[in-house]
Image (tube, coloured by chain):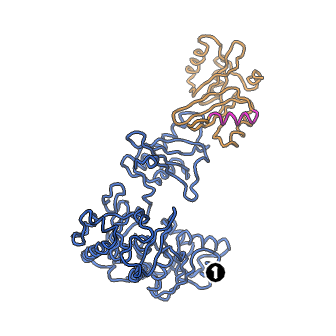
Chain colours: A orange, B blue
C-alpha cells in the first residue's frame, strides 16, 4: 500500500530546483506530484514518480543527494471538513504525521493526499481500521494514465 | 625505533649559559643588532621615526619598541635592498621560493656562514650526530637554505656528507643501501616516501644503516614521527629555521625531544598574538617574531615568521637553557580574525570531524555586510546524512554550527551544499574566501 517518494536535497542557490526536474525529464520520467520544503539555508524537493527506481538512478548519476521514502496516499472527500476528519482520526490514533501534500489527480469526488508517517505500515493499518481509504500505487498510477 | 642511544653532547658552551648571563649577552647583542641595522636605509628611517638608538635598548623588553619586518618588506626591497654591508663583503646568496612570483633573497658574509654552520652543528650534535658518521642529505641544493645549511653543519661536526640532493627515490635508496649512511636529512614526508618505495620493492627499510634523521622544511606531527621511526628504525629529530632569519639552525631538538631549543644567544624570540601583537603567555600559541642578534649581511629586526607555535621556558634535562618552541602548528596566513576572535581554518575542520567522523570538505566565506563580520561555512551534504525530513537536516545543520562554536568560539552560518562541489584538499585547496579583503576592509 505504500508509495515511493524520492527526496532530493537542494542547495540554497538559484537554479537548484530546475536541475533535478531536468534530470527526470531527460530520463523520460513524469512527475505525478511534488512538494517543496525550504528554509533560508536549504530545501528538500519531494517527488512522486511512477518509475521511482529509474528516477532514483538518474538523480544519483546526476550527482543529486537523493533518498527513497515510503509515503501513504489517502483518499479524502473533496468537501468542507474532508481533510479535518481524517486528520482528527490520525491524531486520535496517536500517529505522528511528518508532513503532507496533495496529488493533482482526483478520484471521482475525492482528492488524493500524500502523508508521511513515522511508521507507514502501522499508519496504513490504523487508517484502514478507521475506515479511511488508502490508495495503493498500482491503483494510483492507473488514474494518471 | 632505533636501539642507537643518544649521548647528551653539547656543541657550544653558550647553549647552557645561565639565564641571567644569556640575557645580558642578548641585550649587548641587541644593541649591536640595532647598530648594524642602522646601516640599512629601511631600518634607519624606521628607527629615526621613533627615536631608536642602540643605547635606547635598556632591557630586552625594549625589543618591543622596534619596528617589525614582514615578508612584504623583503619583497619591496627586492633583490638586495636590505643589505647592511657592501656587496663585496658577501660570501653567499640564498633565496626563499616565492609561491607568487619572484623569490626573496637573503645574503651572508663569511662570518654569517661560519655562524650558520655552527648553529646547524649544535642541533645535529644534540640529535646524535657524531664525527665519523655519514650523513645522506636529500634536501635540494640550490637557492633553498636546507641543503647547504645542513651540509656545512655536518662538516662542522666532523661527519661526512653525501650530498644526494632531492629527487629520484630509487637512486636515493641505492645510495642509502650501498654507502650505509648513518643519518638522513630531508623532509619528513620524503622519509616516508623512501620507506614506502622500499616496501613496494619488497625491501625492509629497517635494514638500512640509518640511526638518526634530522627533519625540517615542512610541518609534521608526532604521529608522523612514530611512523617514520618504526618504518625506518631510527630516531627522528625536528629542527626549525627560515631563510629570512638565517635558514635551518634557529632551533632544534635535543635528546629529550620535548620542544626545539632556540639558539637564544643569536636569536631573540617573541611569541605574539598575531591580531594584537601583544605577547602571549608561555604555553599559548602565537606568532613567532624573531630578531637576529648577530647576523651581519642582512640584519633582521622582529621578523614576523607567520609561524604559529608556543614557547616553553621550563628547565630541560639536557642542560640547555634556550627556551623551547613547540612544533609549528599553523601559519598566520591561514588565520582569520572574526569579530576580534582568532580562528584557524583547521579549527573548523576539527569541528566538522567531530560531527561526521570523516574528513569533510568545506569552504569558509567571511564578509562584513554592515559593521559586523559574518562567517559562512559551506559544508558538503553527505548522502548518508540526508533525510526527507526537514527536522533531521535542520538538526544536522545545528550540530555543525554548535561544533564550530565549541571548537572555534565563533557563531557561523552553515550552508549545506551538494557533494563533490567544493574544491578538494589535494595541494593547496582554497579553504577561505575573505570578501573583507576584496573590499579593502582588512
Label 1 sits on residue: B174
The residue that appears at 78% across and 23% down in the rendered structure is A145
Pick whichever, B34 or B316, lies toward us. B34
Quadrant of the image occupied by residue B19: bottom left
Secondary structure type for disc 1: helix
Q: Which residues are magenta?
A: A17-28
Name the chain under label 1: B
Relative side of A102 to B182, left or right: right
Say which quarter of the image contains residue B30.
bottom left
Residue B439 on the magenta span = no
B335 lies above or below B102? above
- Whether residue B121 is visible to the viewer of this picture, yes or no, is no
> From the viewer's perspective, is B247 left or right of B418?
left
Give the vertical position of B153 relative to A50 (above or below).
Answer: below
Q: Position of residue B154 (x, y in %)?
A: 47, 83
Whether residue B165 sits left or right of residue A78 in the image: it is left
Residue nearest the observer in this picture, B412 or B195: B412
Of all residues, the one furthest to the top in this rendering is A80
- Is residue A6 among the parts visible in the rendering? yes
Above or below B221: residue B393 = above
Q: Position of residue A45 (x, y in %)?
A: 62, 32
Query: Could you tell me residue B153's position as x and y percent?
Result: 45, 82
Numbered-mark total:
1
| Residue B29 at x, y percent in the picture | 28, 76
Which residue is more in the foreground, B16 or A76?
B16
User: Dominant secondary structure of the magenta stretch?
Assistant: helix
Amino acid at each position: 500500500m505504500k508509495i515511493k517518494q524520492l527526496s532530493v536535497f537542494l542547495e540554497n542557490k538559484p537554479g537548484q530546483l530546475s536541475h533535478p526536474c531536468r534530470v527526470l525529464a531527460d530520463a523520460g520520467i513524469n512527475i505525478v506530484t511534488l512538494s517543496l520544503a525550504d528554509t533560508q539555508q536549504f530545501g528538500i524537493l519531494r517527488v512522486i514518480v511512477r518509475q521511482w527506481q529509474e528516477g532514483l538512478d538518474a538523480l544519483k548519476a546526476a550527482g543529486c543527494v537523493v533518498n527513497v521514502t515510503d509515503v501513504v496516499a489517502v483518499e479524502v472527500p473533496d468537501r468542507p471538513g474532508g481533510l479535518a476528519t481524517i486528520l482528527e482520526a490520525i491524531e486520535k490514533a496517536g500517529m505522528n504525521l511528518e508532513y503532507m501534500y496533495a496529488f493533482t489527480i482526483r478520484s471521482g469526488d475525492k482528492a488524493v493526499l500524500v502523508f508521511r508517517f513515522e511508521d507507514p505500515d502501522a499508519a496504513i493499518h490504523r487508517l484502514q481500521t478507521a475506515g479511511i481509504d488508502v490508495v495503493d500505487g498500482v491503483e494510483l498510477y492507473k488514474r494518471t494514465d | 625505533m632505533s636501539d642507537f642511544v643518544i649521548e647528551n653532547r653539547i656543541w657550544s658552551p653558550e647553549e647552557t649559559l645561565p639565564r641571567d648571563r644569556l640575557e645580558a649577552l642578548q641585550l649587548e647583542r641587541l644593541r649591536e643588532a640595532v647598530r648594524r641595522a642602522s646601516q640599512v636605509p629601511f631600518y634607519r628611517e624606521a628607527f629615526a621615526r621613533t627615536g631608536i638608538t642602540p643605547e635606547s635598548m635598556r632591557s630586552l623588553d625594549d625589543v618591543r619598541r622596534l619596528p617589525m619586518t614582514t615578508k612584504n618588506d623583503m619583497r619591496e626591497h627586492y633583490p638586495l635592498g636590505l643589505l647592511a654591508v657592501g656587496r663585496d663583503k658577501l660570501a653567499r646568496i640564498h633565496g626563499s621560493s616565492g609561491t607568487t612570483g619572484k623569490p626573496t633573497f637573503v645574503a651572508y658574509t663569511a662570518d654569517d656562514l661560519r655562524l650558520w654552520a655552527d648553529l646547524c652543528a649544535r642541533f645535529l650534535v644534540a640529535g646524535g650526530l657524531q664525527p665519523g658518521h655519514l650523513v645522506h642529505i636529500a634536501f635540494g641544493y640550490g637557492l633553498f637554505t636546507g641543503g647547504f645549511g645542513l651540509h656545512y653543519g655536518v662538516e662542522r661536526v666532523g661527519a661526512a656528507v653525501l650530498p644526494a640532493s632531492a629527487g629520484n627515490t630509487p637512486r636515493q635508496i641505492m645510495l642509502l643501501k650501498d654507502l650505509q649512511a648513518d643519518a638522513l636529512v630531508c623532509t619528513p614526508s620524503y622519509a616516508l616516501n623512501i620507506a614506502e618505495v622500499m616496501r613496494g620493492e619488497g625491501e625492509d627499510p629497517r635494514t638500512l644503516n640509518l640511526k638518526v634523521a634530522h627533519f625540517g622544511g615542512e610541518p609534521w606531527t608526532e604521529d608522523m614521527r612514530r611512523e617514520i621511526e618504526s618504518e625506518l628504525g631510527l630516531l627522528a629529530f625536528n629542527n626549525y629555521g627560515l631563510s629570512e632569519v638565517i635558514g635551518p639552525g634557529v632551533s632544534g631538538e635535543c635528546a629529550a625531544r620535548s620542544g626545539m631549543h632556540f639558539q637564544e644567544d643569536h636569536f631573540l624570540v617573541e611569541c605574539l598574538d598575531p591580531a594584537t601583537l601583544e605577547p602571549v603567555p608561555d604555553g599559548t600559541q602565537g606568532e613567532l617574531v624573531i630578531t637576529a642578534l648577530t647576523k651581519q649581511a642582512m640584519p633582521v629586526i622582529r621578523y614576523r615568521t607567520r609561524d604559529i607555535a608556543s614557547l616553553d621556558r621550563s628547565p630541560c634535562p639536557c642542560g640547555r637553557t634556550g627556551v623551547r618552541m613547540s612544533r609549528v602548528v599553523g601559519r598566520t596566513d591561514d588565520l582569520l580574525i572574526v569579530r576580534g576572535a582568532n580562528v584557524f581554518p583547521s579549527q573548523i575542520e576539527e569541528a566538522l570531524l567531530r560531527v561526521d567522523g570523516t574528513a569533510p570538505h568545506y569552504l569558509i566565506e567571511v564578509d562584513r555586510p554592515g559593521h559586523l563580520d559574518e562567517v559562512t561555512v559551506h559544508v558538503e551534504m553527505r548522502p548518508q546524512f540526508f533525510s526527507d525530513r526537514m527536522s533531521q537536516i535542520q538538526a544536522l545543520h545545528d550540530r555543525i554550527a554548535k561544533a564550530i562554536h565549541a571548537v572555534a568560539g565563533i557563531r557561523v552560518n552553515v550552508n549545506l551544499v551538494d557533494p563533490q562541489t567544493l574544491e578538494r584538499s589535494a595541494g593547496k585547496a582554497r579553504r577561505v574566501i575573505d570578501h573583507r579583503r576584496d573590499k579593502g576592509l582588512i
